[in-house]
Image (cartoon, rainbow, N blue to C red):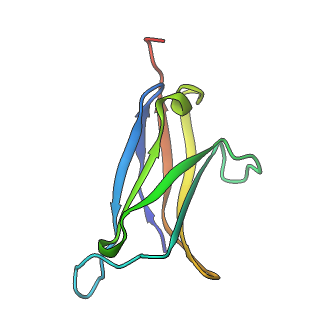
Amino acid sequence: MAEYVEFNVDQGTDFGTYINLSDDDTNEGQDVSGYIVTGQLRRSIVSANVTDTLKCQLSDPANGEIYVSLAAANTANLKPGNYFYDIKLTIGNNVSKLIEGIFIVNPSITK
């Protein structure tokens, strides 16, 4: 089951966070070399429309480190409020959901 995490971002600013995957038994980074990481935002969990795509990259795959980001130009186009997201890890035909939750966009005063 995916871990639930809330992200907060101010509209019109850069968002970025690291996700570190570790082996439950050894507590060492899980090697995710060769995996593909994807993530999307939607206004509701049943929406067919993708609001935006999170940029997901393996920053240190041998140690299970993933960087997830969304540029300021993208967050500027998001209306303030709550969005739903998830981040998935894929290798071959095996897909697993890493995290999911609410992506909260706070309004910006300065435009």
| Residue 62 found in image quarter | bottom left
Residue at the (50%, 74%) spot, across then down: 35
Q: Residue furthest top?
A: 110
Q: Residue furthest bottom?
A: 25
User: Where's residue 91, x and y in %?
Assistant: 56, 79
Q: Could you tell whether 59 is left or right of 74 in the image?
A: left
Residue at the (47%, 25%) spot, across then down: 12
Nearest the viewer among 90 and 60 is 60
| Residue 93 found in image quarter | bottom right
User: Where's residue 96, x and y in %?
Assistant: 54, 75
Residue at the (33%, 78%) spot, across then down: 30
User: Where's residue 64, x and y in %?
Assistant: 34, 71
Is 40 rendered above or below residue 105?
below
| Residue 25 found in image quarter | bottom left
Residue at the (58%, 30%) spot, across then down: 78
User: Where's residue 75, x and y in %?
Assistant: 52, 31
